Amino acid sequence: MIKNKIITLLLLAFATALQAQEENFYYENAVFNDDINTVMMHRDGFKLSNPIYEIGEETQLVFKFDDLSGEVKDYYYTLIHCDANWNESFVLQSDYLDGFTENPITDYARSFNTTFGYINYRVMLPNENVDFKTSGNYALIVYEDGNPEQKILSKRFYVVEPMVDVEGTVRRATLDAFKGGNHEVDFTVYHENLEIQNPREEVKVVVMQNNRWDNAIKDLQPLFIRPGQLVYDYNRENVFAAGNEFRYFDNRTNRFNGENVLSTEFHRPYYHKTLMFDEPRAGEMYFAYEEMNGQYVVESQDREVEDYDLECDYTFVHFTLELETILLGGTVNVFGELNNWNANKSNEMTWNFDTSAYELTMLLKQGYYNYYYVYVPDGAQVADHTNIEGSYWETENEYQIFVYYTEMGSRYDRLVGYRQLNSMTSRR
């Protein structure tokens, strides 16, 4: 009888654990409130840097966002550890956080001299209230009134403990089915300082292009396993469509038209900017120029503006993509860091039958922006950045390589290595 009860209890415990794992959440860069805009995260002092913190270093991460409701809210944040695929790790917060697991956002200020009134909120990580015990993928969750069910946004970032070295190159793809439109990312993980018993089970690598998640390569296994080395030197499995250089526009002032801005108009009470009309670039000759690989910065060219976070205004920006005919079977979206690399309803363009063009209006803070036009087939998880923009191996891209280690018996993925490669400086 006692034996049967023990078996029953063990089965119940196993079922409960299994159910908890199945209910784990998937975290992405997302905004759940229409009043929230310009969600940014980077290393303090480096606006265009990736949100990557190395355990024990002095440089903090800066997280900030605007609330355009104009009302001060009672916002809190918490930090969630995730696995390599951004599913919530099956561990207690006290296992990976040192300090309080829930904290109020007390650093905020109201905008001034702007047509749009907003509240700018800021969090520095780590801080006196919370620090990191372990490395890995993290999601910062902001919610209202101390109620975790009232989420307003989630933002991904990384905490790394550098235990392995990563070296690699970017080249024109060896087996290029698209005649010069692909990049091949070859790399080697050196782990002399980390004992790995079973690389195929304990190590996961993720390769990203310009910080995009939708087209990331996530299932690579080492092609060669050598003493202290894991070699990922494939011909097909590590290939990305190179795409084209990002389009850009300058929205740093309302006093004149910035680069690639057709007109600036004030329709009381707000400013509107119409960008130069765009056309498809697929099939055209490649043209090289410097850009920011899809990123943006909040800035102003007006001399009297000193605090970009509080004095940069919001404007309605009008995009136009001229096409001969509508693209059936999918959507056309404006794409880049300006919308967290997500293709959804907030950046989906509308076809104008009268002008034979796709159109979209976005509310954006003053700054300098990069963007793409992408085609998203119905039901697809990956945005196609080549259909409209074209793809050329000469394109300058940045590739991020993340190395995760899960020790046998462990319940979470540690981030033990990170390297960023540039297709121009890391070219072979």
Image (cartoon, rainbow, N blue to C red):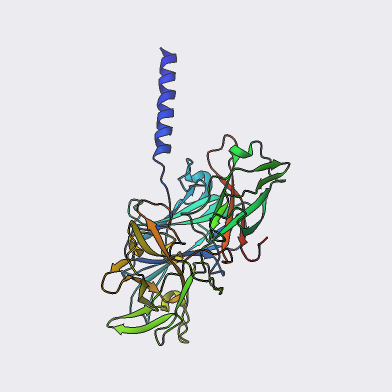
Q: Position of residue 61 (x, y in %)?
A: 53, 62
Q: Foreground: 347 or 327?
A: 327
Q: Residue at x 57, y 57 (%)?
A: 400
Q: Residue at x 41, y 42 (%)?
A: 24
Q: For the C terminus, give its image quadrant.
A: bottom right
Q: For the N terminus, give its image quadrant.
A: top left
Q: Is residue 372 left or right of residue 189?
A: left
Residue 127 in view in this figure: no
Q: Residue at x 39, y 84 (%)?
A: 254
Q: Give the image quarter of residue 310.
A: bottom left
Q: Give the image quarter of residue 320.
A: bottom left
Q: In the rendered view, tell whether residue 12 sits above or below residue 118.
A: above
Residue 397 in view in this figure: yes
Q: Foreground: 391 or 256?
A: 391
Q: Position of residue 212 (x, y in %)?
A: 49, 58
Q: Foreground: 368 or 11?
A: 368
Q: Is residue 270 left or right of residue 233?
A: left
Q: In the rendered view, tell whether residue 253 sits above or below residue 59.
A: below
- Count the marks: 0
Q: Is residue 375 left or right of residue 208?
A: left
Q: Position of residue 407 (x, y in %)?
A: 60, 38
